[in-house]
Each structure stands twice: as C-alpha cells, then as structure tokens.
Image (spheres, grey):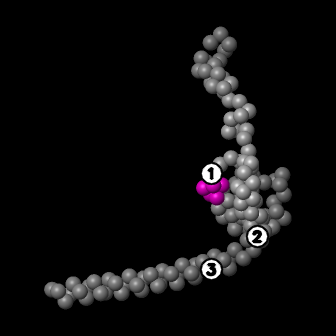
C-alpha cells in the first residue's frame, strides 16, 4: 500500500495487462456473408418511415442513449445477439412512425378479433364439456 492504492488494485492492473490486441475486444467481423446479411437487415430498417422521421427530428449530436442507435454490423457477436439488437432497434424506430394512431387501432382491432374468435372456440369447448358432464349425472 505504499503507492496509496489498495492492494487489490495492483491485482487488477496485472489482469488487464494480459489483454492484447489479438483479443476479442479488438476483433471485427470479417465474414462477407455475415456482413451482407447484417447490412441487409440495417438497410431494411433504414428504409422505414420511422427511421426517416427520426433522422429529420433528432440531429445526431442531440441524440441520447434512450433513442434508437443502428447496430454495428462489424461487431463480433452471435447471429442471435445481432438479430435481437436489430429487433430492439426496429421496435424503437416504430415510435417514430407517421401512422402511430392508425397502427395502434389496427393492432387493437386485430387483437379484439383474435380474442373473440378464441373466446368463441373456448366457450364452445366449455359448453360441450358441460353438456357431457350434465348428461353423465
């Protein structure tokens, strides 16, 4: 403790010295098929109305961490991880869509229709079960 730092701090510095430029921290994706697939997903997101609205509404210097950020196609990660990043990015971009109210009402309508059709089927099943139980008694 002669240096003024706790003893554990010297242990940490030794572990960080073992990192080299060849580690996964500094590596980038180089497989052309992976890069093409990722770029296609990014281009698909950038072609949406929500992305264009976002670009015009929020200049890059004024963006914060809670706003959509395009995933880095050069990062080394699994396909599942990158797909999840794209999914989250796309969901955040939907908040900038023009037809936000129309989409929400359409989704509500679809949900209502689905629930009604599901409810009808389940009520028919429950009736048939009740009918079976009443006839057996």
Front one among 30 and 110: 30
Q: Earlier in the sequence, mark 2 or mark 3?
A: 2
Q: Nearer the viewer, mark 2 or mark 3?
A: 2
User: Which residue is labeled 3 in the image?
Assistant: 105
Q: Residue at x 52, y 84 (%)?
A: 113
Give the CA distance from mark 2 to mark 3.
20 Å
Image: magenta residue range: 78-84
Picture coordinates of residue 16 (x, y %)? 66, 27
Please give the name of the residue rendered at 25% of the width and 88% of the height, measured from the top-left corner.
131
Let me know if residue 85 is in the magenta part: no
Q: Pick the residue in front: 108 or 127.
A: 127
Expressed as whole percent of the image width and height from the top left, the position of residue 63 reads 78, 54
Residue at the image point whose x is 61% and y is 21% from the top: 11
Residue drawn at the location 58% of the way across and 78% of the way down: 108
Query: Which residue is situated farthest in the top direction here?
Result: 2
Q: Are marks 2 and 3 in contact (CB under 8 Å)?
A: no
**Dot 3: element:** helix
Asked whether residue 36 is in view, the answer is yes
User: Where is mark 1, residue-wise?
Assistant: 78
Residue 118 drawn at (x, y percent): 44, 81
Task: Say if 105 sits above or below 50 in the image.
Answer: below
Query: Label 1: how many residues lie within 10 Å, few (<14), some (14-19) or many (20+)?
Result: few
Q: Is residue 9 visible?
A: no
Instruction: Relative to 101, say whether 70 is above or below.
Output: above
Q: Earlier in the sequence, mark 3 or mark 1?
A: 1
Q: Quadrant of residue 59?
A: bottom right
Quarter occupied by residue 105: bottom right
Q: Nearer the viewer, mark 1 or mark 2?
A: 1
Look at the image and say whether residue 81 sits in the magenta stretch. Answer: yes
Residue 10 percent location from the top left of the image: 63, 19
Q: Which residue is mark 2?
A: 48
Helix, strand or loop for disc 1: loop
């Amino acid at each position: 403790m002669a240096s003024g730092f706790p003893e554990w701090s010297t242990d940490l510095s030794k572990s960080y010295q073992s990192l080299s430029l060849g580690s996964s921290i500094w590596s980038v994706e180089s497989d052309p098929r992976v890069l093409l697939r990722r770029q296609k997903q990014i281009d698909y997101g950038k072609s949406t109305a929500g992305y264009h609205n976002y670009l015009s509404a929020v200049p890059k210097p004024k963006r914060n961490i809670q706003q959509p950020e395009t995933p880095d196609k050069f990062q080394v990660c699994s396909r599942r991880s990158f797909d999840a990043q794209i999914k989250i990015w796309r969901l955040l971009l939907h908040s900038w869509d023009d037809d936000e109210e129309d989409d929400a009402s359409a989704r509500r309508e679809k949900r209502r229709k689905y629930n009604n059709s599901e409810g009808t089927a389940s009520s028919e099943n429950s009736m048939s079960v009740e009918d079976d139980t009443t006839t057996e008694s």
